[in-house]
Amino acid sequence: MNFLFLITGLLFIYILGWLLSYDRKHIRYRSIVVLFSLQMIISFLCLHTSAGIQTLKGISSFFNWLMVQADGGVQFVFGGIVIGKNTSVFFLNVLMPIVFISALVGILNYIRILPIVIKWTGWLLNKVTGMGELESYFAVSTAILGEPEVFLTIKNKIPQLSAQRLYTICASAMSAVSAALLASYMKMIPGKFVVVAVFLNILSVLLISCIVNPYVPTNDDDLAKIGIEDQKQPFFQVLGNYIQDGFKLAITVAAMLIGFVALVTFLNNSFLAIIHVSFTTIIGNVFSPIAWIMGVPMKDISEVGSIMATKLITNEFAAMGTLHQVSAHLSMKSIAITSTYLVSFANFGTVGIITGSIRSISEKQGALVARTSLKLLLGATMASILTGTIVGFWF
C-alpha cells in the first residue's frame, strides 16, 4: 500500500508539473531520476537505519540543548513576567530563541565555517546531479541562511540571471528554511522530521524545477566571489547585526502569526454564523484529496488537509501549532507526512518577501519574479508535497 501511495504522489506531482511546465519537450528526466534516487537513499538512511536514527536524535538533542542555552538570555530579560502556572508563552519559548541561534549563525559565517560548508556541499551536489554550480550553491546556502538574507550572497549575479535560473533560485528560497528557525520548529514537531525535511527539500525543489522549469545550466560562475563578506567588518559589529536580524525575524513572525491567526479565527466565526461550517473545514476539504494522494490515512485526511491549507494561507508556524494541538489524534504516518510538508516557506506571505528582496537588488528582475509568483508558489508547494510523500513511504 505504501508503494501505491508513493506512485500516486509522484504521478500527481509530475502531471501538475507537466501542466505548469515552461518547456515540456525538454523535461530533464535523467536529473529527476538522480535526485529522486538520492532522496530515497537519504530518507531510508535517516529513518530506517540505526546509524541514521541515532544521528537524527543527536541533531535534535543538540538543537534542544541550544534552546536551553537561549533560555538564559530570555529569562534574564523577561524572567520577571508572571504568566501563569504551567503556561507556555509562544513568543518567549519558541520565537525569542531565534535571536541566539541567529547569533551563532553569524559567528559561524564570520569565521568562514559556513561558507566553506556551503561551497563544497554545493559543489558536490552539482557534480552528482548536474543542476548547475550557482543553483546547487544557492539550494544549500538557502537551507542554512534562509531568505531574504541568502539573496545577498549572490546579489552581483541576480541582475544577469536568465528567467529560468531566477525561477530556480527563488523556488529554492521558498522551499528551504533558515537554520535559525530549526530549534523553534523542534519545539512543535518531532525533531527528526525537521532534519529530514531540510535534507529532502534541497533536492525536492531542484527536482520540481527539472519539470516546471527545465534548462541546461551553465557552469561559468565564479563561486569564490560570492557570499556575504562579513569578514570585512569588525566582529562585534557583525555579531550585533545578526542578533538584531534575529530579533527582527522573531518580531516579524509574531506579527504575521497575530494577523493571520486572527484572520482565520474571524473567517471561522463568520462562516459558522452564515453556513454553519468553519472556514478551516472548507479549505481542509479542498486539500483532503491531496493529503490522501500523499498517503495520509483516510481517517486523518480532513484534519491534515486543513493543516496543509493553513500553512499555505498563513505560514508554517501557525500550521505547526495546529498540528501540535491535534497530533494525539493522528497516526504516526500522518504526523510524519504533515510535519515534513510544513518545513518550508511555501506560503503567500513569502511570495511578497522574495519579490521585494529581488526588487531591492534589481527592479527588472523583481518585476519578472512578480509575474511568475503564482507559479513559484505552486512549485515550492509541490516540492513540499514531494518531501511529505517520500517520508510517508517509510511509515
Image (cartoon, rainbow, N blue to C red):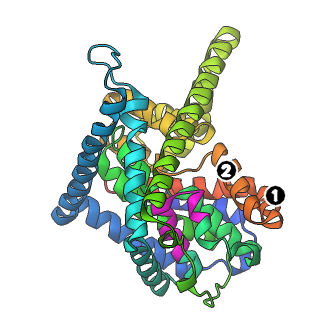
Looking at the picture, which amino acid does disc 1 mark? Arg
Element carrying mark 2:
helix
Where residue 308 sits in the image (x, y, percent)? 53, 40
The residue at 58%/76% (across/down) is: 135
In this view, the residue in front, 307 or 234, is 234
Quick check: 282 above or below 66? above
In this view, the residue in front, 295 or 126, is 126
Q: Earlier in the sequence, mark 1 or mark 2?
A: 2
Quick check: 327 above or below 206? above
Looking at the picture, which amino acid does disc 2 mark? Ile
The residue indicated by pointer 2 is 353
Quick check: 274 above or below 159? above
Give the magenta-colored segment's residue range. 137-151
In this view, the residue in front, 134 or 228, is 228
Quick check: 274 above or below 67? above
What is the crowding at mark 2: few (fewer than 14 residues within 10 Å), some, or many (at least 20)?
some
